[in-house]
């Protein structure tokens, strides 16, 4: 039964719920922001997450992981979304860990996966080159230079790019700027000569970076997967990230819904609680319906990865489009229903709205994924 | 081979032998629906044969107890039966408000005598039932109904008017909400069964915007009803009414998944868009229309997954879950949106009324578009559904 959690999964969800509520409440994000923390996330917390097995959740036991699977990871991400917990889960586990599992050779897997599972290595995927997600729009070039390659180009919106100990860079070894073929993935040391990393402070207080590559030398052993065939790996990895982010947004949406509902039962105007007004009741009932549908598509998408179904791209776009749009809707409605207090920094709803926008824009928003869904369906 | 697999094999063999060939073809019009009843006419004798064969096994009501003529199947067996019926594309042997709505309520609330009297006739399609709920002054506020039922010693006397009584002009019996205590609201309602042939009962069809007349105004003037026709206790009919509404809402929710007249004849939304609007490089030529189609398909898929999740949760013993409260609202709104979109796709070809210049499928879509408007009104309006979610699920106060 794909849409109902097993007992083991319920247990994991409970562990994750308790962990994020107690150890990584929203106050943590505020502290990181207010102290202008150089990392932008709490390394001690990340270590604890690794000890709980969260970092190695997609990694097989052979490489030190817990191999709990995508549904398990989704449950952890959902709970992390409820407290806006900043962590390298997306960059390191969803994106780079998956890429190494899928495309890495034995040496690369052995060198990288145990380090990720132990929480000792943070990685980042340098992919985007423009303001909109587009995995084939790659102008960054990797030119063969004897047995090595030289990479030149500029990447933007690299999640956790300024704290990563290792980068995966999507660069062109062939084809033109928008071709599907000719893209190759490289493992790159961020300290290599010619790499310039600039942290970009995003509205959600999470980490991203612009990275410039100026004739950066990488050995041929740094190629991840096949030369010119990177798009196949990228698309699988991106679908995992899209579904994972959808799970995070599900938690975010549920949290804003719950806190808004509580506020409506407490805030009084005209001598009664504002939750007694039908204008607000019906909007909340409609949002409730949308969230129920959202939960179904996220669970289905997670189990699609787990069961290695062949409709993963389709359900990934369904989940990412729906959750991106609902996260935007719910946070806007939540803010409005909090009235003037929703506009203050003191209330959390604004923080959720900011995170919703960044998560929505990551790896394709509703527009991107509806277009992709239609193309996949052949119309 | 386990018991269920054995059941599947036997069912398959029986269906192969007993489902007539013409009952394995899609219906070409709604007129072919088999509703049963005293006045049923069977243009196709195989439809009657199919009904009788299925009824004999109790498979028109597969999960009802065999003692009342039902199939006595477990949920798992019924699931297999439905799968096997779909496999051979069998038409429903019987469509019936008696099976969908009244029967489950009788099983729960009626006395033994009533069950023995009515259930077997429902199973066999001998009696066609209609539902007397709404009144001119009691729509969304259903409990405000005024149809008067007086105790005259050896019988009840019913006076009043119902409205939106589906197929009252074709039905044999009615299950009816009546007021037995005018001093109370919810606690003054009773649940009564009576024969539509009783003197004083008159049904007048109402012309609807779709051009069809499935609904009636039904008038009761000094209608004498035997006292044994009261179901449950006097003045406790509201409990039965609510349970029955649940069955009705579940039935209507299924529309969100797309059914008759939902454009299937046009090959689905995207094929229709390519045909009526044109395509460029394999894409629907209008990017805006293409996006609308995708939104519709995505929401439809999300809704179907949610109904599936709810069923899985129920099966896993987690109860019906809060999600089920939104099905009537979401399913009907989705269905209305689908027809609006189909009309946009078809342009003026979706605006024909009858006659030359339009295919049968086109006219069906146009008429179904008009019919679909009632989905979010009948069986509890969308607004009433949202009130229910607000109060019962979200706990928001009055």
Image (spheres, rainbow, N blue to C red):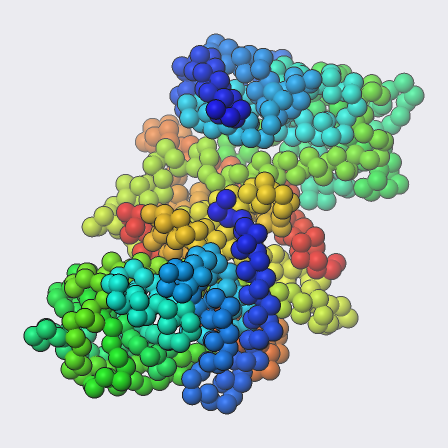
Percent x, y for residue A8? 55, 54
Percent x, y for residue A232? 24, 58
Residue B228 at least partly seen: yes
Residue B224 at least partly seen: no
Considering depth in this image, is B220 or B192 the residue closer to the camera? B192
| Residue positioned 77% across, 42% down in the render | B144
**In screen coordinates, is B50 left or right of A187?**
right
Percent x, y for residue B360? 37, 28
Q: Determine whether A108 is above or below B358 in the image.
A: below
Q: Outermost residue, front direction? A: A62
Considering depth in this image, is B199 or B6 the residue closer to the camera? B6
Q: Determine whether B184 is above or below B232 in the image.
A: below
| Residue positioned 42% across, 73% down in the render | A119
Q: Determine whether B305 is above or below B202 in the image.
A: below
In terms of image quadrants, where is residue A94?
bottom left
In terms of image quadrants, where is residue A271?
bottom right
Considering depth in this image, is B299 or A31 the residue closer to the camera? A31
In terms of image quadrants, where is residue A240?
bottom left
| Residue positioned 65% across, 48% down in the render | B384
Q: Determine whether B207 is above or below A37 in the image.
A: above
Considering depth in this image, is B108 or B235 the residue closer to the camera? B108
Count of numbered badges drawn on the protein = 0
**In screen coordinates, is A232 left or right of A342?**
left
**In screen coordinates, is B38 left or right of A214?**
right
| Residue positioned 81% across, 29% down in the render | B232
**In screen coordinates, is B33 left or right of A135?**
right
Q: Outermost residue, right direction? A: B153
Q: Outermost residue, bottom direction? A: A35
Percent x, y for residue B259? 46, 35
């Amino acid at each position: 039964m794909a849409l109902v959690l097993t007992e083991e999964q319920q247990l994991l969800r409970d562990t994750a719920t308790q962990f994020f509520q107690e150890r990584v409440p929203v106050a943590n994000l505020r502290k990181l922001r207010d102290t202008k923390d150089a990392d932008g996330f709490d390394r001690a917390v990340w270590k604890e997450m690794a000890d709980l097995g969260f970092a190695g959740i997609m990694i097989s036991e052979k490489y030190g992981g817990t191999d709990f699977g995508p549904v398990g990871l989704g449950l952890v991400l959902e709970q992390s979304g409820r407290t806006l917990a900043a962590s390298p889960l997306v960059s390191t586990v969803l994106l780079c860990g998956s890429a190494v599992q899928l495309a890495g050779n034995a040496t690369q897997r052995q060198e990288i996966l145990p380090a990720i599972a132990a929480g000792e290595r943070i990685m980042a995927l340098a992919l985007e080159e423009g303001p909109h997600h587009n995995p084939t729009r790659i102008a960054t070039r990797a030119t063969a230079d004897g047995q090595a390659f030289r990479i030149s180009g500029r990447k933007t919106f690299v999640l956790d790019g300024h704290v990563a100990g290792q980068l995966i860079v999507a660069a062109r070894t062939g084809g033109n700027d928008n071709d599907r073929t000719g893209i190759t993935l490289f493992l790159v040391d961020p300290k290599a000569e010619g790499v310039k990393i600039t942290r970009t402070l995003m509205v959600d207080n999470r980490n991203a970076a612009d990275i410039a590559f100026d004739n950066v030398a990488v050995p041929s052993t740094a190629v991840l997967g096949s030369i010119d065939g990177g798009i196949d790996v990228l698309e699988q990895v991106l679908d995992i990230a899209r579904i994972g982010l959808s799970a995070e947004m599900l938690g975010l949406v549920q949290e804003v819904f719950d806190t808004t509902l509580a506020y409506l039962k407490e805030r009084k105007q005209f001598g009664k609680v504002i939750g007694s007004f039908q204008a607000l009741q019906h909007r909340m009932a409609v949002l409730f319906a949308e969230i129920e549908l959202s939960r179904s598509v996220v669970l289905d998408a997670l189990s699609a990865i787990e069961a290695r179904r062949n409709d993963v791209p389709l359900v990934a776009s369904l989940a990412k489009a729906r959750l991106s749009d609902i996260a935007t809707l719910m946070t806007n409605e939540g803010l409005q229903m909090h009235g003037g207090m929703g506009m203050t920094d003191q209330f959390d709803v604004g923080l959720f709205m900011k995170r919703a926008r960044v998560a929505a824009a990551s790896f394709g928003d509703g527009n991107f994924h509806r277009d992709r869904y239609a193309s996949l369906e052949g119309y | 081979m386990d018991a269920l697999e054995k059941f599947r094999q036997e069912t398959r063999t029986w269906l192969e032998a007993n489902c007539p060939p013409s009952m394995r073809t899609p219906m070409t019009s709604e007129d072919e629906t088999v509703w049963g009843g005293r006045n049923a006419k069977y243009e196709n004798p195989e439809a009657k044969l199919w009904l009788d064969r299925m009824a004999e096994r109790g498979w028109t009501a597969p999960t009802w107890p065999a003692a009342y003529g039902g199939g006595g199947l477990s949920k798992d067996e019924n699931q297999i039966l439905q799968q096997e019926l779909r496999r051979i594309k069998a038409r429903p042997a019987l469509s019936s408000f008696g099976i969908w709505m009244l029967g489950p309520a009788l099983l729960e609330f009626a006395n033994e005598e009533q069950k023995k009297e009515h259930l077997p006739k429902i199973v066999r399609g001998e009696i066609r039932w209609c539902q007397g709920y709404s009144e001119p002054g009691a729509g969304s506020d259903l409990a405000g109904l005024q149809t008067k039922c007086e105790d005259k010693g050896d019988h009840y006397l019913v006076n009043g008017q119902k409205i939106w009584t589906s197929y009252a002009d074709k039905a044999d019996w009615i299950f009816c909400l009546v007021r037995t205590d005018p001093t109370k609201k919810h606690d003054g309602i009773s649940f009564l069964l009576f024969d539509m042939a009783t003197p004083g009962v008159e049904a007048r069809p109402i012309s609807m915007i779709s051009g069809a007349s499935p609904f009636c105004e039904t008038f009761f003037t000094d209608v004498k009803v035997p006292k044994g026709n009261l179901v449950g206790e006097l003045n406790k009919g509201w409990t039965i009414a609510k349970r029955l509404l649940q069955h009705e809402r579940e039935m209507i929710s299924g529309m969100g998944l797309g059914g008759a007249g939902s454009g299937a004849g046009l090959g689905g939304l995207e094929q229709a868009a390519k045909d009526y609007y044109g395509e460029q490089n394999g894409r629907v030529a209008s990017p805006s229309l293409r996006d609308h189609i995708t939104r519709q398909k995505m929401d439809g898929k999300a809704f179907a997954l949610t109904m599936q999740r709810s069923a899985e949760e129920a099966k896993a013993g987690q109860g019906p879950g809060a999600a089920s409260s939104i099905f009537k609202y979401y399913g009907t709104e989705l269905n209305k949106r689908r027809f609006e979109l189909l009309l946009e796709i078809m342009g003026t070809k979706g605006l024909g009324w009858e006659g030359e210049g339009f295919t049968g499928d086109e006219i069906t879509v146009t008429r179904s578009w008009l019919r679909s408007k009632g989905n979010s009104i009948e069986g509890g309006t969308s607004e009433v559904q949202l009130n229910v979610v607000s109060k019962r699920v979200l706990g928001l106060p009055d």
